[in-house]
């Protein structure tokens, strides 16, 4: 196990605001594997037989089933290909490598695994199924396919143990890996030459991996007790964003039947933002494919600085660019890239016109025939942004360089509210309102409010983190003991309420998978979760009994409300700060396509500040 001291644990949560699960000790793996093989788990797949093991909570597990061929060598930056068939039973009793990423707390690997970890051979999935309903002869159960978060640049399916959700909810749970960062999303003209088909040219390789996993489920899950005609996709953060993209992808049609997006935004990236140089008239992102190539050419010793690298790159024919790209190792591809907890800002989910539409998702959701219109649950955590602010020196001092102390609690809460409320407005209210105006398919929304983290002389979690991003995930997987969390976050006082809320959430989530409505939960004993309308309470607040318990409220949060708040806020110190906040919330979001209005910006008094330059400064 990773050896992390108490203060290190505090730093992990305060800095990164995320949870992860401990990886198994590799030295113990062979012994565990030999002991856990169970002949009762022998199953046929369309590529060959697999054998798994008994899992916790009266489940069977199959870990590390390949759902596509390893995307190695010339299969890098191409659509996933069918896996090669095998003959003898494949032992699926241990997780496979995560996809390539920078090392960090979400990689699921032991300390000291390297600065770049994981493998390009990573397209594997894991299954948990209740033992009594785990064969083709059983009554088929709903399938829930989990898409992990991590900014689409870090994370792995290996850190989400799903036995409790499978057992409590009587569902078959599948967790999947997908290519990450530059390996999962790479948009460049050199990859769109005539000899490449539209999928290979799309750049959306990570999205195509998810579609390949869903296709595998359609073809095989009945042999594990799952119902291929009742598949729910669910994911958190980037995983929630990926849920929305799968709803919009024509290639995912009929591969799933319900969707749950947890803290997932609807943003997608136009080609110009993904590819342009940062100093173009339409500026590309800092790690656009052109900027990444400039960095790569310098690191390869083929250019001495950015200017000479740009001159060289503009002179290279497409075949030479792709040859250079494919020559780079996994370590070289990530060389010079940095980020928080391994997460970096690679362009992703491109509007390519094949895998994803060429317009924004909100535009797509205005017409039911344009997307996979299925029952939807969506929500955010009340204090999403606090997890990313908890070590921001603008708001926090670090005692002894480690312990966070808020400089001004009121200012901290005020700033967190702007970004958290904007997250909610764009992920939930604005998206749901667009959908229900044009569809009769039900939509359900929530806000997660648990903010009872422990207080001590070290830190007050109830304020520092509150109901922050990612903290709801272990409630679904019931993995509080195995997860890395800050010391003192959970206490004797708050654990009973936490555990009850966790059980209630699993009940709502699994009932939605069964019926398409969270209703009153699996046992019918919870407050009724009503569908979203504009007429009555439409938002389910998920909280402990001490915080009021699960309950329906009407508490809207829209972009128009936020724009008005910015315009009238007396606490913003000057006009430039007001303009910069407006830019950060509404221009950066989805490249400005959904909520940016130049006239509104100028009416705010901001005409003197170029918004793209102002954005870069922040």
Image: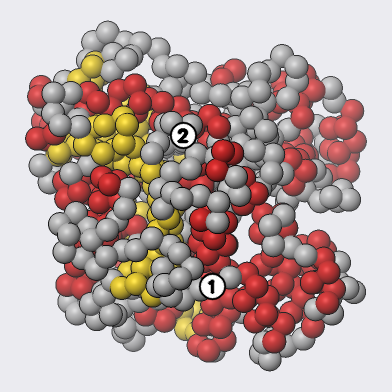
Residue pictured at 31% horizontal, 53% vertical: 517
- Between 465 and 430, the residue placed more toward the observer is 430
Q: Earlier in the sequence, mark 2 or mark 1?
A: 2
In this rendering, position of residue 417 left or right of residue 87: right
Colouring: secondary structure
Residue placed furthest toward the bottom: 570
In this rendering, position of residue 277 left or right of residue 209: right
Mark 2 — residue? 210
Q: Position of residue 141 (x, y in %)?
A: 21, 36
Crowding near the residue tagged with mark 1, few <14, some 14–19, many ≥20 C-alpha atoms within 10 Å: some
- Between 561 and 592, the residue placed more toward the observer is 561
Mark 1 — residue? 557
Residue pictured at 86% horizontal, 38% vertical: 310
Residue pictured at 49% horizontal, 68% vertical: 534
In this rendering, position of residue 249 left or right of residue 563: left
In this rendering, position of residue 467 left or right of residue 610: left
Q: Is residue 50 visible?
A: yes
Q: Nearer the viewer, mark 2 or mark 1?
A: 1
């Amino acid at each position: 196990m990773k050896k992390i001291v108490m203060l290190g644990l505090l730093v992990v949560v305060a800095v990164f605001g995320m949870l992860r699960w401990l990886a198994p000790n590799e030295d113990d793996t062979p012994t565990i594997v030999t002991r856990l093989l169970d002949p009762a788990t022998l199953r046929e797949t369309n590529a060959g037989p697999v054998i798994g093991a008994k899992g916790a909570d009266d489940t069977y597990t199959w870990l590390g089933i390949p759902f596509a061929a390893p995307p190695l060598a010339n299969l890098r930056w191409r659509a996933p290909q069918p896996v090669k068939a095998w003959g003898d039973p494949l032992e699926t009793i241990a997780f496979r490598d995560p996809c390539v990423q920078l090392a960090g707390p979400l990689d699921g690997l032991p300390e000291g695994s390297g600065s770049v970890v994981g493998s390009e051979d990573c397209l594997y999935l894991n299954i948990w199924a209740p033992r009594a309903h785990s064969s083709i002869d059983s009554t088929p159960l709903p399938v829930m396919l989990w898409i992990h978060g991590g900014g689409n640049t870090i994370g792995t399916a290996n850190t989400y143990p799903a036995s409790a959700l499978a057992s409590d909810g009587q569902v078959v749970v599948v967790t999947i890996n997908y290519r990450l960062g530059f390996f999962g999303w790479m948009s460049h003209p050199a990859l769109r030459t005539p000899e490449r088909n539209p999928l290979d040219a799309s750049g959306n390789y990570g999205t195509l991996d998810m579609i390949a996993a869903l296709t595998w489920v359609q073809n095989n899950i009945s042999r594990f007790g799952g119902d291929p005609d009742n598949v729910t996709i669910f994911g958190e953060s980037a995983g929630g964003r990926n849920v929305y993209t799968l709803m919009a992808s024509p290639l995912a049609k009929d591969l799933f039947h319900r969707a749950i997006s947890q803290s997932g935004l609807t943003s997608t990236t136009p080609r110009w933002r993904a590819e342009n140089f940062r100093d173009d008239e339409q500026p590309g992102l800092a790690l656009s494919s052109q900027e990444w190539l400039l960095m790569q050419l310098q690191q390869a010793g083929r250019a001495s600085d950015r200017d000479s690298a740009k001159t060289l790159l503009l002179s290279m024919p497409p075949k030479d660019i792709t040859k250079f790209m494919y020559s780079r190792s996994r370590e070289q591809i990530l060389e010079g890239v940095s980020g928080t907890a391994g997460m970096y800002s690679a362009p992703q989910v491109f509007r390519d016109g094949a895998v994803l539409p060429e317009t924004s998702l909100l535009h797509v959701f205005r017409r039911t025939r344009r997307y996979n219109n299925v029952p939807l649950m969506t929500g955010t955590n009340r204090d999403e942004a606090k997890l990313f602010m908890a070590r921001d020196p603008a708001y926090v001092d670090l005692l002894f360089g480690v312990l966070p102390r808020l400089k001004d609690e009121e200012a901290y809460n005020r700033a967190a509210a702007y970004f958290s409320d904007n997250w909610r407005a764009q992920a939930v209210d604005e998206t749901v309102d667009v959908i229900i105006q044009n569809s009769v398919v039900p939509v359900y929304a929530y806000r997660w409010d648990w903010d009872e983290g422990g207080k001590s002389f070290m830190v007050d979690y109830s304020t520092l983190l509150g109901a922050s991003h990612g903290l709801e995930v272990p409630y679904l997987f019931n993995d509080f003991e195995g997860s890395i969390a800050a010391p003192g976050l959970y206490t004797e006082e708050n654990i009973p309420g936490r555990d009850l809320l966790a059980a209630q959430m699993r009940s709502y989530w699994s009932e939605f998978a069964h019926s398409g409505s969270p209703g009153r939960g699996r046992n019918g004993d919870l407050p009724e979760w009503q569908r979203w309308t504009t007429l009555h309470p439409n938002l389910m607040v998920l909280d402990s009994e001490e915080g009021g318990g699960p309950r329906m409220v009407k508490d809207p949060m829209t972009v128009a409300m936020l724009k008005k708040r910015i315009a009238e806020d007396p606490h913003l110190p000057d006009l430039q700060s007001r303009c910069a906040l407006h830019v950060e919330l509404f221009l950066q979001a989805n490249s400005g396509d959904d909520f940016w209005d130049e006239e509104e910006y100028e009416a705010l008094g901001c005409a003197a500040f170029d918004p793209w330059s102002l954005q870069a400064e922040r």
